[in-house]
Image (cartoon, rainbow, N blue to C red):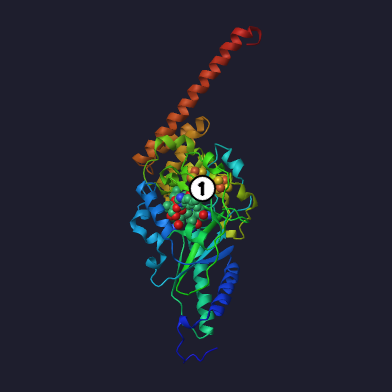
Amino acid sequence: MPNSAQPLAPISQLTPAVLRKLAEQIKVWGQELGFAQLGICDTHLTSEEPKLQQWLDNQYHGEMGYMANHGMMRARPHELHTGTIRVISARMDYLPPNAGFAANLNDPNAGYISRYAGGRDYHKIIRNRLKKLADKIEAALKEMGISKPNSRPFVDSAPVLERPLADKAGLGWTGKHSLLLNADAGSWFFLGELLIDLPLPVDIPVVADCNTCVACIKSCPTNAIVEPYIVDGRRCISYLTIELQGAIPVEFRQAIGNRIYGCDDCQLVCPINRVAPLTAEADYHTRTPLQHPDLLTLFAWTETEFLKLTEGSAIRRLGHRRWLRNIAIALGNAPTSTAIISALTARKLSTEVDDMVIEHIDWALEQQHLKLSQLSRKTQRVIRTIEKGLPRDA
Ligand code: B12
Ligand code: SF4
Ligand code: SF4
């Protein structure tokens, strides 16, 4: 332990051997902090820039203005946080136990909530853990008489290309659905990163690919994976139900089915996910009211109930209005029922809806009536057939 009065030496004093040992130690700390894996890469993402530009030029970001706002900073972590020379990329598993994917998707009277969102909001959890990792690095360097590194944690909302960085840091390879895949863990994990000015040794990217598989492309309900590795955000149910502020285009409403917050289909059909481990974080377990929830119960929540029952969850940011918008679509897609028609009609009169929500309710009512008349026409035909063909048993 150096004398506390002594000035600390600069980071440049660290030898390659010490940095190698520190990198190993950082990965151990990462696991102790609940991350499934950590990897280290440099900040050069130049080869990603034209692909990102093309994606933006194609308007695939839709209303996500934040994707276009920062120019090419997303591909330049050193511009985002000056001095950065390494990115410590981290992944954290979120697959909850008893996910019940098939049972939930197969029940049109229940809403489906993407399994990353049923528990506590991951942003805070991951940022806090990355901050703790930074504190451990700082303490270890101080112990060696080296000055404090300059670092900053990021997760999701920052203008940085997290998936390409994680790919570079050896955490997995990019699947055709554009998400990061890990041979031992599938894709049910979040990414986060610590930008830092320590010249740590970098990891080697994983060489693997999807081979001839195209399951995710074929299964996407809205054909959002327009080419292998390229997602047109505007078509993705995750964008439509979470990011989009206004009306959901009519062309996608039936395909959305009962998905009221996000979508997991491209991950559900992915063969690599067969080996995915369950999360060790109880905070990511799906809360009871959000596990296989009855659509009519959710639709009846007042704004106060919505805010209370989604406290601490990412869903809260959606707001009650868009929550009702999404559920209205799912109700329109549900089998015809007088209870649904009554609930939709009653909601239209509540003070909690605006024109945008009302338009979705009207669409849902139209779908319900359409199915009702189709059903009654069919039933009428059956009755006529019985009367004609089976007069004795009619
Ligand atoms: C914007 C965004 C979205 C948008 C757009 C999605 C998209 N694919 O871009 C929407 C709202 C649709 C979305 C949806 C989802 N998202 Co999102 N999203 C982001 C965000 C904020 C930015 C992604 C981005 O930079 N897109 C821009 C485009 C250009 O990047 P890209 O898709 O990676 O494009 C690259 C490829 O096209 C590649 N490319 C082009 N040609 C080729 C060819 C080859 C051979 C290869 C290898 C690559 C390649 O080059 C491009 C540039 O690098 C990140 C967090 C972050 N800050 O990075 C999370 C993130 C990517 N999302 C995440 C998740 C979990 C989801 C959902 C699963 C959520 C859900 N269940 O509803 C879905 C999955 C949809 C999907 N298949 O992508 C996780 C992914 C974790 C993982 N395992 O990879 C991230 C990293 C958030 C996090 N911190 O954990 N998301
Ligand atoms: S999340 Fe759903 S809608 Fe989006 S790309 Fe994947 S399968 Fe398609
Ligand atoms: S479903 Fe197939 S093509 Fe899509 S990401 Fe998984 S392995 Fe790759």
| Amino acid, disc 1 | His
Query: Which residue was labeled with disc 1?
Result: 177
Seen at 58% across and 76% down, the residue is 21
Residue 14, above or below 309? below
Q: Say whether residue 35 is visible.
A: no
In which quadrant of the rendered image does the C terminus lie? top right
Q: Is residue 23 above or below residue 5?
A: above
Picture quadrant of residue 250:
top left
Residue ID at (57%, 59%): 206
Quarter holding the N terminus?
bottom right
Q: Position of residue 327 (x, y in %)?
A: 47, 41
Of residue 62 and residue 41, the one placed in the foreground of this image is 41
- Within 10 Å of disc 1 (Cα), the crowding (few <14, some 14-19, many 20+) is many
Residue drawn at the location 61% of the way across and 57% of the way down = 279
Q: Which of 14 and 251 is in front in this view?
A: 14
Q: Where is residue 339 in the image (x, y as percent from the top left)?
A: 51, 33
Q: Position of residue 338 (x, y in %)?
A: 50, 30
For the residue labelled by badge 1, is the local secondary structure a helix, a strand or a loop?
Answer: loop
Q: In this view, does 358 lie above or below 134?
A: above
Estimate the x, y position of residue 2 in percent, counting from the top left. Answer: 52, 90
Q: Is residue 237 visible?
A: yes
Cβ of disc 1 within 8 Å of ligand 1? yes
Please give the count of numbered marks on the rendered protein: 1
